[in-house]
Image: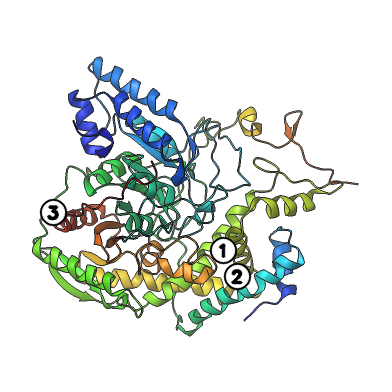
Amino acid sequence: MTDITDLGVAAIRTGVAQGDFSAREVAEGFNANVAAASALNAFIVTTPEKALEAADKVDADRAAGKTLGSMAGVPIGMKDLFATDGVQTTAASHILEGFVPQYESTVSSNLWAAGAGMLGKLNLDQFAMGSSNETSYFGNVISPWKRSGGSNAQMSPGGSSGGSSTAVSARLAPAATGTDTGGSIRQPAAFTGITGIKPTYGRCSRWGVVAFASSLDQAGPMAHDVRDCAIMLGAMAGFDPKDSTSLDLPVPDWEGELNSDLKGKRVGIPREYRMDGTDPEILKSWDDGIAWLKDAGAEVVDVRLPNTKYALPAYYIIAPAEASSNLARYDGVRYGLRDLPEGSGLQDMYAATRAEGFGDEVKRRVLIGTYVLSAGYYDAYYTQAQKIRALVAKDFEDAFQKCDVILAPTTPTASFGLGEKSDDPLAMYLNDVFAVPASLAGLPAMSVPCGVNGEGLPLGLQIIGRAFDEQGVLNAGLAIEERANFTAKPDRWWV
Amino acid sequence: MSVDKQTVAKIASLARIQMGDAELERMVPELNNILNWVEQLGEVDCSGVEPMTAVIPNTLRLRDDVVNADPLTGGDRRDDILANAPAREHGFFGVPKVIE
C-alpha cells in the first residue's frame, strides 16, 4: 500500500470518507514524520495529541454516520502566527515566548470545524518579517531541498512561511496555513515546489492572527496541488464580523468550480516583470508557462504595469510603518516578555523589554516605520508611498481591462543557501519584487510549481487575478499544473 | 535624506527600543541603505493621486449596541485577559511605580 503521508488533502479526505484508512492512521503517520524531522526545525511546538484527538472525532463521526467536513481527517500544520487556544503562539519571537492565547483565531477555528487537526505550530520569520526564514528566534528552518551534485549547503525554504513550506514539501503535513503580507505564501511555495494561494484581501479573517502590516496581511493555504489549495481555502475563508476588513461575501465553491479549460480567457504578460538580472532559467520557465496556458485554450496578450519598479520600495515604507504601529503593543505589560532592570521605571521597562524581545530585522523595520511616520517626514515618505500604492493598483485595474489573469514568475531566483543573503537586508527584500505588487493591490495571487532549475531546485509560476476572482487564478493554476508534470521530490536526508 | 547616529538614537527612543552605541552605529548604514533605496519614489509624479488607504472598497460596519453581543470579544473575561500578564495584582496588570 502507498504511504499515507504521500497523499494530499483531497486524497486523505476521500480515503477517510470511504474507509480506506482511518483518520487516526493518517494522524499517526504524519505525527511520526514530524517527530523524525527535527533536523528541519519546521515546528516550534508539536501537538501530536491534538492531531489524534481531531482524528478520533472524525472517525467517531464517520462511524455514527454523520456528515463529514471538507477537511475531515486531514491533519495540518499551523503557522505560529495564528492564535491557538491553550497552545503557545510566538510569531517566532522572543517577546511572545511563552504566550498562551486564551482564544482561537477565526481561520484556525474554521479549519477545526471543517474536520482538520493540528500537528503543531510552524516556524516562520520573526513577526513574518523575512524572506528566508533566518529571522526566527527559534532558529532557521531548513529546506528539505538540496542543490544537485551532492552539495551539502543548507537551503532556504523561503519566508516568512518557511516552516509551512518545509513541512508540506517534506511531507510532515499534507497542507499548512500561511500568511502573505508581501509574498510570504508564494515565495516559500515557489522555493519548495509546492502550491500556495493568497486570496483577495479580506477573504480570510485576520482575527487572532498576529498583525504585521494590517492593510496587507492575508492568510491562505499551502499544499501540494491546486485542488488541495481550493479545498483548504474554502475551509479558511468567510465573513467574520470580528475583523473590520473582512469581506461580507459568500465563499464560492472553488473546488467544485475548478476547470482548466481556458478557452475564451485572456492571459496578460506584463513586460515590466522582465527585469534585468532575472535568472534566465526563471525567464525560460515563464515562457513554458505561456505555452502551457495557450495549450489550455487561453489567448495571450501583452499588458503594461508601468509602476512595477516602485511597488517594492513603496512596500518597504508602508509595511514597516504599519508594523511600527502594530508592534507598539509589545510593552511587557499585558503578555509576553518583561525585562525590568533593577530600579527602573515604566519607560525603561518598555525600552528594555523591546530591546530584549525583538530580533534585528524586527528592530530595523520598527525603526524605519517610526522614522517614515515621524513629523516632517510623513508626507515625503508615507503619503508618497500610499499614492504609489494607488498607482500600482490602478496599473492592475487597467491591465485587467485587457486580460482575465496575469502570468509572471513568483521569484527572480530559485532558493538560495542559508547565510548567502542574510548580511544584506536590501538584497533579501529584492526577492519579493514579483510578489509585492499584487499584495499592494490586495489581489488574489498563487504560486504553482513549474519545474526545477539546473541545480535541481524548484521554480514557481505566479498567477495574479482580479479582486474576488480566486476561481480564475485557481483555474489557470490548474492548467499549468496539468502541463508542468512537476514530480520532483526532495531526498529524505533528514530522517 | 539620510540619518546619522543621533537621529537613529532619537528614532529608537520614539520606538521605545533601548540601543547601545555599537548597535546604533551598526543601524546607521543599514537604515541609510534602505532609505536611499526608497528615495526613488520621489521621482514619480503623483500630483492629483489620492493616497490609498483601503485596498478593497469596504464600508466599516458598526455592531449592534449590545453589551457582550459576541462573548469572544465582549467583557467578563478578566481572568483570560490577565492570564498571560508578566505581573498581575488584585485583578489588574502590575507595572512599576509611575508616580513618585
Residue A348 visible here = yes
Which residue bears the numbered disc 2?
A: A372
Q: Are marks 1 and 2 in contact (CB under 8 Å)?
A: yes
Mark 1–mark 2 Cα distance, whole angstroms, equals 7 Å
**Residue drawn at 62 percent across, 47 percent down:** A94
Mark 1–mark 3 Cα distance, whole angstroms, equals 40 Å
What amino acid is at disc 2? Val
Tag shown at residue A260 = 3
How many numbered markers are drawn?
3
Q: Position of residue A79 (x, y in %)?
A: 44, 44
Instruction: Of the two numbered discs 2 and 3 on the same chain, state the one appearing first in sequence.
Output: 3
What amino acid is at disc 1? Ala
Give the image quarter of residue A336.
top right
Which residue bears the numbered disc 1?
A: A321
| Relative horizontal placement of residue B41, taking residue A231 as reference (left or right) | right
| Relative horizontal placement of residue A322, taking residue A66 as reference (left or right) | right
